[in-house]
Image (cartoon, coloured by chain):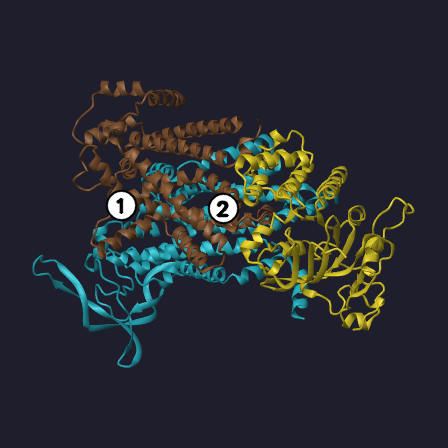
Amino acid sequence: MIAFVTRRLLLGLVTVWLISMLSFAIIQLPPGDFVDAYIAQLSASGSTVSAEEAAAMRQLYGLGQPIYVQYGKWIFRVVQGDFGESMEWRRPVTEVIGDRIWLTLLLSFSALIITWGLALPIGIYSAVKQYSFGDYAFTLFGFIGIAVPNFLLALIVMYFSFTLLDANVGGLFSADYLLAGWSLGKVWDLMKHLPLPAVILALGGTAQLIRIMRANLLDELRKPYVVTARAKGVAERKVILKYPVRAALNPFASNIAYLFPYLVSGSIIVSIVLGLPTVGPLLVKALIAKDMFLAGTIVLLLGVMTVIGTFISDLVLMWVEPRLRHQMD
Amino acid sequence: MVEPILSVRGLQTRFFGTEGTVRAVDGVDFDVYEGRTLGVVGESGCGKSVTARSVLGIVDRPGKVVGGEAWLTRADGSRVDLFRLPEADMRKVRGREIALVFQEPMASFSQHYTIGNQIAESILLHMGVDEAAARKRAIELLDMVGVPQPDRRVDEYPFQLSGGLRQRVMIAMALACDPRVLIADEPTTALDVTTQAQILDLLRHLQQQRGLAIILITHDMGVIAEMAHDVAVMYLGRAVETGPVADIFARPQHPYTRALLRSIPTVMAKPRTRLPTIAGSIPHPFNRPQGCAFNPRCSESLGAVCAAHEPPAVTADGHEVRCFIHGGQP
Amino acid sequence: MSATVNAERYAMATQRQLIWWRFRKHKLAMASLFIVGLFYLLALGADFLATADPHATDARTSYIAPQPVHFFDDGHFAPYIYGLKGVRDIKTFKLVYTVDTSRRVHLTFLGHGYPYDFLGMNTDIHLFGLADAQRGDGIFLLGTDQLGRDLWSRLIVATRVSLTIGLVGVTVSLFLGVLLGGISAVYGGIVDTLIQRSIEVIRSLPTIPLWLGLAAALPNDWSVTQIYFAITVIISLLAWTDLARVVRGKFLALREEDFVLAAELAGASQFRIIFHHMLPSFASHIIAAVSLALPAMIISETSLSFLGLGLRPPAISWGILLQDAQNIQTLALAPWLLISAIPVILVILAFNFLGDGLRDAADPYG
């Protein structure tokens, strides 16, 4: 058990390290160093930077020194919570991102819960009632869920709610609360706006998980231990819920580890279509404007978030699977 | 004459697949008596396991019992036909009056619950006791089947046990509610020879102690010789020969039984002689031969009559055989 | 009787025949195969089928609704569409084009249009054209976009781009997947661990932000073709992991099979065992995995382009077409722009059914 947790933790750390390098690479990728880019940006907006200021900045970021020194300096400051300055907004990156990272997390996590909540019962139903009308209906739904990329789904939902219901479904807050500080009313407002984008985001993953759950459960239903349970005189419903469903939870749980990054990814594109105040629109804008510190930081934060999410789902997996708990102890 | 605990007549089980219907069990009769073991023997695919599951009403879809009767004498002396029992009542028979032991102890346990949990399940279900009592009984059962340190093992998972221990636990689980009939479906096939002997000893011991009626399903004539009182030889869903074990071994009458007995290796055999085998292979279930199903492989075939007609059962001295060589009119 | 014949046929059939028989029973998969084939044919003949130059802009034909084709003129088969006429809006003084039902413009078959290359030939023959078109007239089967470009022509040229980018991307992923999955399985040990852990790490990365980051770093002055290949590579870099897992899993499973042992005992070389004995038995699994990877690839490209960080205009792909439909105001004005979503959904659905059918058929004895 300890070995498993340690291994997962180490893997998570390696992933974080890899993500930090990729984020740094993204910051470094545009041609020229970013002080040049910064100066160009500033002069485009009318202000100027003196040669001393530029030299001081180059010194600060270690530009001109070997790349690993630059990475070292950058990561050292990141660990202390200094993510640099957004060129476009001329404010510290952390300030620009603000609540958006938490809203991204909230959206992705809600989608995760919805995915679970829908896929589990539907998957069980489809497997137990294989080839029934309901099974076919859910299979069809599943295929559509997989075939319609979630940004397209968001577009379609938005179009129909606009033309048929005359309602704008975008955003996570009503206009009254958009700029207001956090209050109970604002939280309630958020709760009212959250379900639709969360469901849109969840649908693709739900469709996949239903198929995984169905396939696994169909496999498990044929195993001898199911017959054993029946031979004991256990009622059919309890036989299925206690034994094969429990066994089918394992692949189900291990898939969640990959579901979370998928949802975080999806949240970006869905947010752009629906105009949600998550980091998604900010990231795309930053990338298009080559505001690299902002973009790199967002990639880094999203990456770290998924690693934490993945680690948590590993713990869930361990709780589901006694074999893992009893390995090597 | 003693009443059988379980008496099966004309059992027919079919599998309705998309490619056609398979008659997995096609008219099987047998009786099981208290304190005696009925050995059911035959090659794989002859319908042995399906017979066992049919009796308990747990044949997997698309299989279905389509005919026959299975009369069980219950503890209170009443007799019921299992095939006409409502599902809710049938559940009270399973595990309580008839229990099952399987071939693969590993696959037959869920790996997600402790063995204590899995044994206690049927106790809680049938005996009306609380969890503490069920757990106590589970430990007693483990002790009874010879699992060392039962109070510690009860909280372990099946994957933590050895193959032999697992089969002992499986037997403990089957005996949890004091059933009167135990169906053991190839209980020793997956085990090595010494463990096999131990498990058979255990079964025999438990039978003497409790007067269990055992249906022992196997393909191993050696196991039959050691364990069974009565034998049913099955071929393609039919019992071709039934009778007392000594009789069957001393005077096998059906050509198939004889062929099976010839193909057992013995230490008495002359070295470097070929072990006799049965010619041909078991027909595909869709291609059940016309007439006597064994006819195409039979070395003693009478020709046309065997190819055209199914031999009826001929009984003499409690020894029943279905073969034209021993009489019977087409 | 027929059961006997069937059983014999079954026993005699080659692996490939068995797979084909099983696949044929999947009606949905067969239909999907047909649809996918049709789309690739469309992609091949895209220019021939286009009715207008997909790049040609004309401010006056901005946002024309889809125009129905009328097939009979005075009881004769003579397909025509109505012409367009400009009307000055009294309030805004803008020239607005509307359908002029008094003027019928007839369709011609195999007429001349914009020039294009087809299989090395330079030609300007198109399936349809207009007989005597005036400026602004066009066969706008699916309407036009803001710049007055014909959506039908753009959509089928986009089909070519989006479908091939999937193929190229899958080829790259397949190469990486078979190579790394194979190495992982053959060498085992530390190499295997390293590759497997890398796969886990890659799979736990949020892909879209990374793609976006990498795609944004592509120089602005690259040509359409360069961007096309760069995007393909970026997508493939993160997409090979599934294929590698399939290859490794099958490889390890097959190595335990008796026929591989038999080949080893017969003295077959490692190379022969892998390519002659093992590869054919899991080729079908790979094909199934590929046909499931293709739609994911297409979605990736579409998403990236949709966000403005994938292919860039003047390139035309499904994502780029959908980009025009991003804005709800535009959609309210020109809902036909959402038509571009239909081939995306159809193709992805078809590939999924196809992949599923193949995967089921790939285990002929299962």
Chain drawn cyan, letter?
Answer: C
Q: Estimate how packed mark 1 is, as few (under 14), some (14 to 19) or many (20 or more) residues with alpha carbons within 10 Å.
A: many
Q: Is residue C102 above or below residue B57?
A: below
Chain drawn brown, letter?
Answer: A
A192 sits to left or right of A321: left
A296 sits to left or right of B254: left
Res. A274 mark: 1
Q: Place residue C86 in its image quadrant.
A: bottom left
Q: Is residue C351 visible?
A: yes
Residue A105: where, in percent of width, then height?
33, 35
Residue A205: where, in percent of width, then height?
40, 46
Q: Is residue A241 above or below residue A58?
A: below
Callout 1: helix, strand or loop?
Answer: helix
Residue furthest out toward the left: C91
Give the amino acid type for the residue marked by disc 1 in the picture. Leu
Chain drawn yellow, letter?
Answer: B
Q: Place residue A178 in its image quadrant.
A: top left
Q: Is residue C154 visible?
A: no
Distance from the alpha carbon under mark 2 to that under mark 1:
39 Å
* Residue labelled with disc 2: A241
Quarter of the image where the C terminus of chain A is located: top right
Q: Name the one closer to the observer, A57 or B316.
A: B316
